[in-house]
Image (spheres, rainbow, N blue to C red):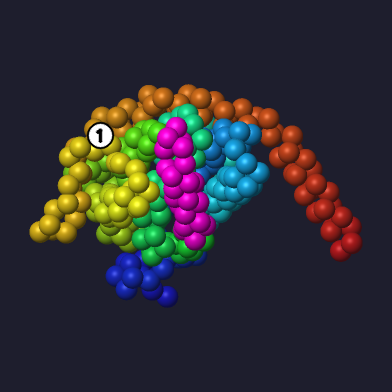
Amino acid sequence: MSTFEELIAANERVEPRDDMPDAYRATLVRQIAQHAHSEIIGMQPEGNWLTRAPSLRRKAILLAKVQDEAGHGLYLYAAAETLGVSREELLDALHAGRQKYSSIFNYPTLSWADIGAIGWLVDGAAIVNQVPLCRCSYGPYARAMVRVCKEESFHQRQGFELLHTLSHGTEAQHAMAQDAVDRWWWPSLMMFGPPDDASTHSAQSMEWGIKRFSNDTLRQRFVDMTVPQAEALGLTLPDPDLRWDEEAETWRHGEIDFTELFEVVKGNGPCNAQRLGHRVQAHEDGAWVREAAAAYARKQAEKGRAVA
Ligand code: FAQ
């Protein structure tokens, strides 16, 4: 059997049964848990519009998307559990503020166009960040990412289509789409994390093949991908310094205000308290479901023993 170092050097997968350094395990638990928490907290900004979707078709699409996010969360919690932590521990850590979730979900959804902006920009950023994670050195996380990315590609396209419809609708609809993009653009760039020189984990995570690219590299990839899409939508990105660099063949963006990211991560974003409060409440309200499921499992086990 190969050692951990041999598996990493050969770019092969580490599986739950393999020996691995404690720090590798801890980094994976941190990142996968944060990712899982992001998926389930990420249901809230969109869930806010389920009852106000403008048509049955839009409502059905949004309902399916939010349900997908629940599924991604469960899938990711299951991947984290293969590392020896329980779902209960992870949820406790989220509720007590010991583990994080993505900064992006602390912003409010003020209009229907925000649903389009989330699909186009937030799912778009998530895909750019996560496609390389399909090659993550830890098997269960990499395999989860393959499925998650496939579904998020649909999510991204529905957001683009929604914004395209609004952008080419009435003047008021176009203005609503533009306003949503104005508010979501910079937070979407911040989703990729702090700049490389302030990223604590990148170097080690890249050495271990958990992350394949740095935060700034992925952020730039997202900008290059998104600028032409904004043009196709007929919408403007709110960055007066955005310019095409002919020589480097890349879009140069203006300076990102990372103090905003650090404030949001610290808990001072516009919706942090509301998001976490809502999550804790949902968990408490769901206690009876967990109790009923445990009682049912106990009964089934007793039945099984009686038969044997
Ligand atoms: N928000 O050293 P780094 C989605 C923290 S899912 C909050 O660079 P790392 C689907 C970081 O944890 C979106 N905290 O960290 C969807 C660390 O703090 P710690 C989630 C952030 O891990 C769409 C510290 O800053 N996706 O969108 C953020 O190497 C639509 C230093 O940072 C993932 O989680 C942030 N944005 O790189 C759902 C993808 N950035 O832990 C609903 C997987 C950094 O030491 C609707 N995760 N921090 O206390 C990753 O790729 C990485 O974890 C990064 C951060 C890139 C996010």
Magenta run includes residue 153: yes
Q: Residue 68: percent from the left, percent from the top? A: 58, 50
Residue at point 48%, 24% (across, down): 273
Observer-nearest residue: 202 or 218? 218
| Pointer 1 local density, CA inside 10 Å: few below 14, some 14–19, many at least 20 | some
Which residue is the site of mark 1? 258
- Write down the region rendered in magenta: 148-174
Q: Secondary structure at mark 1?
A: helix
Residue at point 49%, 61% (across, down): 150
Q: Is residue 276 left or right of residue 238?
A: right
**Quadrant occupied by the N terminus:** bottom left
Observer-nearest residue: 180 or 144? 180
Outermost front residue: 170
Magenta run includes residue 292: no
Q: Magenta-highlighted stretch: main secondary structure?
A: helix
Report if residue 282 is visible in the image: yes
Q: Is residue 236 left or right of residue 277?
A: left
Residue at point 59%, 45% (across, down): 58
Q: Residue 64: percent from the left, percent from the top? A: 61, 49
Is residue 300 depicted above or below 10 in this figure?
Answer: above
Q: Is residue 286 left or right of residue 108?
A: right
Q: Residue 71: percent from the left, percent from the top? A: 59, 51
**Quadrant occupied by the C terminus:** bottom right
